[in-house]
Amino acid sequence: MSIDERGFQFFAQQITNPDDLPAALPLAISEMVAGNIGREKEARKDHPRTCQPGRCISLQGEEMDSERNRVCPVELANSLDNRIRRWLQNPQKILAPYIREGMTVLDIGCGPGFFSVEIAKRVGKSGRVISADLQSGMLEKLRNKIKGTELEDRIKLVKCDKDKVNVVDKVDLILAFFMVHEVPDKGAFFLELKNILNENGLFLLIEPKLFHVSEKAFRETTVLAEGAGFKIYQGPKLPFSWSAVLRNA
């Protein structure tokens, strides 16, 4: 059974009233997309009486809501690239308005390459993708995915540090999808990215709603981006997501 199937099975077990299932399904999908159902499932297995969907309490009584802001582990990489996510967050539809052939694009927090592969197809042979992630295991999964294909020469893999992106190349577009809430120092993060974004470049910022990022938290994130010198514009409308397009001021 795949991770996403186990995630839905786990969530369904929490629904005691069948009438609640239609309302709960979007939450299950959002959780699965962000890779959290798998983590909650493991926590509940370890502490069966102390964990509930959306809020886990350890045996010591310490709240684990901060888990929402932690990086999705490599073991749950499959939850970041599956058919259900492609239905909800179709890379082709999301990226089409922003990417042209020949562009250089930074996919920050690329994970196993859910967006990087589609970006590489769209920028063509004359374009380039910089896929950056904090976890070597995620980059290795992407490396294996493109090995032996024409995309291998278009995608550059970069290992980030916790406090540094480690990208110095100028880029035309930055994609930060469901990852900025995991960054400890968002102000420094935005400053670093502003320095590598071309003058007329775009920064597509998308964050998860529901259990992860509140509307207030997303506004605070955009304020930090403005403080770094970006102008904020309305982003695309996506299910279970906050979004904004950032431009150099």
Image (cartoon, helix red, strand yellow):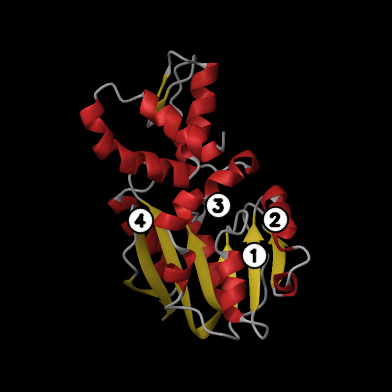
Specify which label sits upstream in the sequence, 1 or 3: 3
- State the residue in front, 49 or 93: 93
Which residue type carries mark 3?
Answer: Asp
The CA span between labels 4 and 2 is 25 Å
Residue 9 point in image, percent of width and height: 44, 30
Residue positioned 50% across, 42% down in the render: 35
Residue 37 point in image, percent of width and height: 47, 35
Residue 244 point in image, percent of width and height: 36, 67
Residue that carries the numbered disc 4 in the rendered image:
241
Residue that carries the numbered disc 1 in the rendered image:
131
Relative to 1, does residue 206 appear above or below in the rendering?
below
Specify which label sits upstream in the sequence, 4 or 3: 3
Residue that carries the numbered disc 2 in the rendered image:
139
Label of residue 161 in the image = none
Q: Using the rendered image of the protein, determine whether residue 228 is visible from the camera's viewpoint.
A: no
Q: Using the rendered image of the protein, determine whether residue 1 is visible from the camera's viewpoint.
A: yes
The CA span between labels 3 and 2 is 14 Å
Q: Quadrant of residue 163?
A: bottom right
Which residue type carries mark 4?
Answer: Ser
The CA span between labels 4 and 3 is 17 Å
Specify which label sits upstream in the sequence, 1 or 4: 1
